[in-house]
Image (cartoon, grey):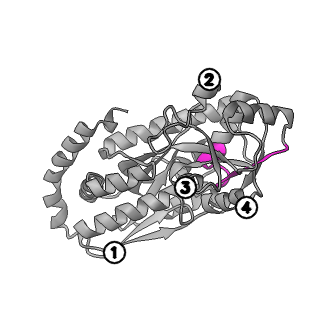
């Protein structure tokens, strides 16, 4: 993506500074702001929201409260923001799940993924990694595929819920590699990871920020990255595509959104503050250590990206014949 270029990122921040005076004239913000995270505490979206909230509250002079509203693959939290007043005080830490995948999986969503949200900025790109319990008798993709084909449906995989990015990542792998794992859906990534660590589940996809501490502690073992490239925090780990599953690619992302119809000056103010926070060395360093790549875009760039993601996952779902139970 062109907007991952750091130079454009810096120029964008400087350009957006010009609109802040008009925004401040309206007195925004003059009360606490809510960040709605559509997943339980501890996941990548939650970590990202809290990092942004801490930094943005300092520069905006208002407290920012992170509120977890989990359920239905992120759709419940997204719906809360979709129906909130468009005044800039209730925001969504948007995610690939409710904002790009759900439109392909759910025939009737309680919100319109385009009309009911005002994009503020794409915030992050989050690698997805395939991990397994240490007792799982496979340690690389070739072994995983061979084992799954020899015992179809006998191993369980966990997801953060129907329609979540790790659910679709595994369904895509099943389709491309011709394997079968039994799906066990949880209400969020944290309980899914807990059962994986406990050995109740054999294998799962999860975001790198969630999986990394457990990989380092030896509680789970990393198999491969789901995206097109690896990460410096696990430099020896290959991608699934490089391990023999041609054409495989799945990654997660996070972005800040407001309800549809939010005034432009409020959006510009929030975009300025998000990009300013992401530009801080301590924020970038802390996120990088977790495997999260800070991004930062204009509202228009983020809107274009969301539309492309919706089209992409609709195509994947259709080609793979993925259906929700």
Q: Which of marks 2 and 3 precedes in the sequence?
A: 3
Residue bearing the label numbered 3: 210
* Residue lying at 67% horizontally and 33% vertically, measured from the top left: 141
Near-viewer residue (108 or 59)? 59
Q: Is residue 165 magenta?
A: yes
Q: Nearer the viewer, mark 4 or mark 2?
A: 4
Q: Are marks 1 and 3 in contact (CB under 8 Å)?
A: no
Residue bearing the label numbered 2: 246
Picture coordinates of residue 319, whole percent (x, y): 67, 29
Residue bearing the label numbered 4: 198
Estimate the spatial distance between the alpha carbons at disc 2 and disc 1, rounded to whole Å: 48 Å
Q: Nearer the viewer, mark 1 or mark 3?
A: 3
* Residue lying at 45% horizontally and 48% vertically, measured from the top left: 291
Q: Which of marks 2 and 4 precedes in the sequence?
A: 4
| SS at badge 1 | loop
Relative to 297, does residue 238 appear above or below in the rendering? above
Label 2 Cα neighbours within 10 Å, binned few <14 / some 14-19 / many ≥20: few
Residue 32 numbered mark, or none:
1
Estimate the spatial distance between the alpha carbons at disc 1 and disc 4, rounded to whole Å: 39 Å
Q: Which of marks 1 and 2 precedes in the sequence?
A: 1
Residue 67 numbered mark, or none:
none
| SS at badge 3 | helix
Picture coordinates of residue 45, whole percent (x, y): 48, 57
* Span of residues in magenta: 154-168
């Amino acid at each position: 993506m062109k907007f991952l270029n750091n130079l454009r990122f810096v120029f964008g921040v400087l350009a957006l500074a010009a609109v802040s005076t008009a925004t401040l004239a309206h007195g925004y913000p003059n009360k606490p702001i809510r960040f709605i995270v559509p997943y339980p505490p501890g996941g990548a979206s939650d970590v990202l929201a809290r990092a942004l909230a801490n930094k943005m509250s300092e520069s905006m002079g208002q407290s920012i409260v992170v509120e977890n509203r989990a359920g239905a693959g992120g759709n419940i939290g997204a719906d809360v923001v979709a129906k909130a007043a468009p005044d800039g005080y209730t925001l969504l830490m948007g995610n690939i799940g409710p904002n790009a995948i759900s439109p392909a999986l759910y025939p009737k969503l309680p919100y319109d993924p385009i009309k009911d949200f005002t994009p503020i900025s794409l915030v992050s790109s989050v690698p997805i990694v395939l991990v397994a319990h240490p007792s799982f008798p496979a340690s690389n993709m070739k072994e995983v595929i061979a084992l799954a084909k020899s015992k179809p449906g006998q191993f369980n995989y966990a997801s953060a819920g129907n329609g979540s990015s790790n659910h679709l990542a595994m369904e895509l792998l099943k389709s491309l590699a011709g394997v079968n794992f039994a799906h066990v859906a949880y209400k969020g990534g944290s309980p899914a990871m807990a059962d994986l660590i406990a050995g109740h589940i054999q294998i799962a996809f999860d975001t790198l920020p969630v999986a990394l501490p457990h990989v380092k502690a030896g509680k789970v073992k990393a198999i491969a990255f789901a995206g097109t490239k690896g990460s410096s925090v696990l430099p020896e780990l290959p991608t699934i595509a490089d391990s023999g599953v041609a054409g495989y690619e799945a990654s997660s992302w996070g972005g800040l959104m407001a309800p549809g119809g939010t005034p432009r000056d409020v959006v510009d103010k929030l975009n300025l503050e998000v990009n300013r926070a992401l530009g801080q060395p301590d924020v970038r360093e802390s996120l990088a250590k977790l495997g999260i790549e800070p991004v930062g875009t204009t509202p228009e760039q983020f809107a274009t990206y969301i539309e492309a993601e919706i089209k992409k996952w609709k195509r994947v779902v259709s080609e793979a014949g993925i259906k929700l139970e």
